Image (cartoon, helix red, strand yellow):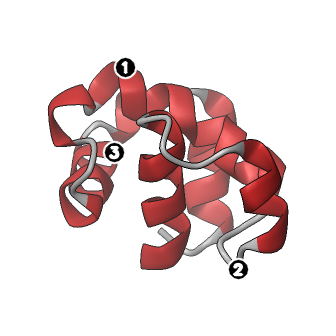
Amino acid sequence: MTLFLATITLTASGLVSLPAFAQGHAGTQAEQQACSRDAERLCRKDLGNDGAVQSCLQANRAKLSRSCRKVFESHGM
């Protein structure tokens, strides 16, 4: 799960392109897209710090988009 969120963090910060997601091991492209906007919107100050973004998204679970919330649920979080 940490690798999955790390990829979301890098995507939200613009450091990873979408084609790189397809090659990665961190969730599907759709899962990453589902949470990248939430990471940008809710956790902008934490971008670049994977653990902090994960904690931020979890702390803001009630504010997550439906699609991102479903991603967390599908990963048992």
Foreground label between 2 and 1: 2
**Helix, strand, or loop for circle 2?**
loop
Foreground label between 3 and 1: 1
| Residue 33 against residue 10 in the figure, above or below | above
The residue under label 2 is 25
Rendered location of residue 13, percent (x, y)? 41, 36
- Crowding at mark 1 (Cα within 10 Å: few <14, some 14-19, many 20+): few
Cα separation between marks 3 and 2: 20 Å
| Residue 63 against residue 61 in the figure, above or below | above
Q: Quadrant of residue 33?
A: top right
The residue under label 1 is 41
Q: Which mark is residue 57?
A: 3
Relative side of 21 to 16, left or right: right
Rendered location of residue 19, percent (x, y)? 82, 52
| Residue shown at the point (15%, 31%) measured from the top left | 45
Whichever of labels 2 and 1 marks the residue nearer the N terminus, that label is 2
- Crowding at mark 3 (Cα within 10 Å: few <14, some 14-19, many 20+): many
